[in-house]
Image (tube, helix red, strand yellow):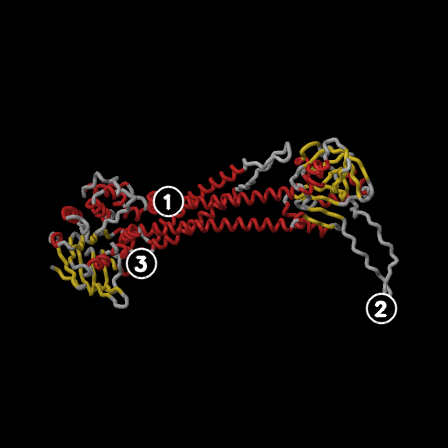
Amino acid sequence: MPAVETIGLRKEYPGVLPVKVLHGIDMRVTAGEFVAVLGQSGSGKSTLLNCLGALDRPTSGRVLIDGEDLSRLDEDELADLRNSRVGFIFQFHYLQDEFTCLENALMPVAIDKGEPDDGDIERVSALLARVGLGHRLRNLPSQLSGGEQQRTAIVRALANQPRLVLADEPTGNLDSKSSQNVFKVMREINEETGVAFIMVTHDDRLAAQADRILRIEDGLLSEE
Amino acid sequence: MAFEVRLALRHLRAGGWQTVLILGGVAMAVTLVIFVSGLIYGLQERLINTITGSVAHITLTAPKREPRVMENLPDQGRDVLVVSDRQQRLWQPDTIDQCQCLQRQIAGFAHVIAVAPTVSGQALITRAGGERSVRVVGSPPLSQDLVSRIDQDLVRGDYLHMQPDQTVIGYDLAGDLGVDLGDRVRLTTGEGVTETFRIAGMVFTGAEAIDKSTAFVTLRAGQTLFGTGTLLTTFAVKLDDPFQANAVGDAMASALDLEVDTWMRQNPQLLSALRAQSGSAVMISVFSLVASGFAIASVLIVSVLKRSREIGILKAIGARSRQILLVFTLEGLVIGVFGAALGAVLGSAIILSLQNIRQPVRVPGVEPDPLFPGALSPGLILGTMAAAIVITVIASVLPARQAASLDPVDVIRGG
C-alpha cells in the first residue's frame, strides 16, 4: 500500500479572481521512498505538501494516507492523523522556546498522550543521539545552532513513528554545510527505518540525492 | 501532568514580568474590592450596632384613641352650629393594662429575646439652677439592660443594682449638669410630680439621644413620676436580628391591641443610606473586577499574537483546537487563582492593620473604637476571589478562542 497517494488533486483559492494552484495531480509514494519535489516559488509545491499532510483540504480530488481517504475525516480526526501518521519539517524549526530539546522532540507524543512514558523518552532520546544531539537533550532551543534546531525538528517529526514525513524546504534557512548535514540525517533515517520522505526544495544538488525527483510547473507534476 | 497544563505553566513562567504584571492586576482588583467592601460593611455594622444596640427594636404602646364621633345629631341644614354636651376626657398618659399576661404573650413571638415593661415620658432634670429636658425611662434594670445594654456601656457606677431613689444618666448629660456619682438631681414631670434621685451611674452609648438626654430609673420610680399607678406606657422589645423588626412588629400589630413602632420605621433615611452604601460597594467591586478582566484579556491577546507561530506548529503536528483553547483558558485560571489569593491576603492585611488605628479617647476608661472599622467575612473574601477567578477565566476565553482558531497553513506560509 502506498504511504500517500493522490487522485485528480485540484486546489483553487477562491476570491474575485480565483487562483488555480494545482490542476489535477496524480502521484503515489511508497514506503521507504525518498522523493524530492522541485519547482519555482509560487508553483504550488507547498500547497501540494499541505494537501498531502492534511493541513489543507483539496478543492477536488482525493488524498489517501495509508489508504485512508482524508476527505472523509473531520477536523479533529485530521488533527489526530497529522499527529500519529505524518511528520512535518518546515523551513523554520518553530520549536517551543520554553521547552528543552528533548521536550520539543516529544511534543507530538505529549499532544497524543498527555505525558510521554519511559518507552517514548527512551526512543526519542535515541533518535536525538542518532542525529548527533545526545549531549543537547536538556538544552533550550535558544542554546542550539540553526542546524541543531532543525535536527531537533526532524526528530520531532519522527516522534510518533509515522510512515510519512513531509519536509518543506527543511534546509532553506541553513548554510550549505549545515544543509548537507541535515539532508544526510534525513536520508539515513529514511534508509534505516523505511519512513517515506517527500522533500520540497530549491536545491538541485540535494534533489539529485533523492530516489525520485518530481517537478511541479504551472500546477502540473512531471517526473524526471 | 497533561500537555495542556504543562504548556500553560511554561507560558506563564516564560512570560516573566508580563505574568507578574497581569497577576498584580488581578491581585490589586481583589485587594480593592475586599478593602472597600470590608470598610463599608464595617462602618455599616458599627452604625447599625450603635443604633440598634442601645434602643428597643420594637416599642409597643397603648392604642391611640380615635376622636369620638358624635352620634344622633339632629338634621343639620346649612349654617347650623352643632354643640356637643359631652365632656372632653381629661388628659392622662395612655397606659397598658394586664401587664404580666401581655408581657408573656409578647415574649412568645419569634426572634424576641427580651421584653422590658416600661413607663417613659418627658421630664425636666434640675441641679443647682441648671436644667435640661430629658426622656425618663422607668423599667426594671435587669430587663432594660437586655434591651439597651446599659451595663455594657456604663462608664462609671452601677445600673443593675439601681435603687428606686437612684438614676443612671447619659455621660454627656452629666457633663452638662456638672454632676458626679452620688450627687442629687431632681426630676419634674408634666404631671407635676417632683422626685429627688442620686446619680448611680453614667452611660456612654455613642447614640446622642441617650448620652445627652436620657435618665434611667426603676419601673416603680417611673410609675410614681408619671402617675400611672401599676400600669405601663410601653413594652420595649429586643430581637435577635434587628432587621426582623418590621416583620415581627407586623405580626404583633395584628395579634395585639397595641400601637407598634419599630426602629426601622423610625429611621427610614438611615436604611436607605445603608442601601445606597451597599449599592456603591457592589458597583465599585463590579467595575474594578471587570476592569481587571479587560486588562487580562488584552495582555493575553498580545501573548497569543506573539505565540501564533508556536500555536500554528502545535496544530500542524496534531494538537486539536480544543487543546489550544484549554491551554490559554488554563493560563487565565492560574492567573485568576493566584492573583485572587494574593489579593485576598493583601486586602485582609490592610483591613486588619487599620483596626489598630483607634479613635481619639473621648470618655476616660472606655476603649475607643477603631477609626476605620472593617468587617472581614469568609463570605466576602471567598465571594470576591470566586468572582475574580470567574472574570479572569471569561477574559481569557476570547484570546484562547483566537488562538484555537488559528489556521496552521496561514502561520507556516507567513514564515
Q: Is residue B163 visible?
A: no
- Relative image position of residue B85 (x, y in whole percent): 88, 58
Q: Which residue is mark 2?
A: B77
| Lateral position of residue B137 relative to residue B7, left or right | right
Disc 3 marks which amino acid?
A: Asp
Do callouts 3 and 2 mark residues in contact (Cβ within 8 Å)? Answer: no
- Label 3 sits on a secondary structure element that is loop
Which mark is drawn over residue B19? Answer: 1
Q: Which residue is mark 3?
A: A74
Disc 1 marks which amino acid?
A: Thr
- Relative image position of residue B185 (x, y in whole percent): 77, 35
Disc 2 marks which amino acid?
A: Gly
Do callouts 3 and 1 mark residues in contact (Cβ within 8 Å)? Answer: no
Distance, label 2 to label 1, CA atoms, is: 92 Å
Q: Is residue A57 visible?
A: yes
Chain identifier of the residue bearing label 3 in the image: A
Q: Residue at x 31, y 44 (%)?
A: A115
Distance, label 3 to label 1, CA atoms, is: 36 Å
- Which quadrant of the view contains residue A36? bottom left
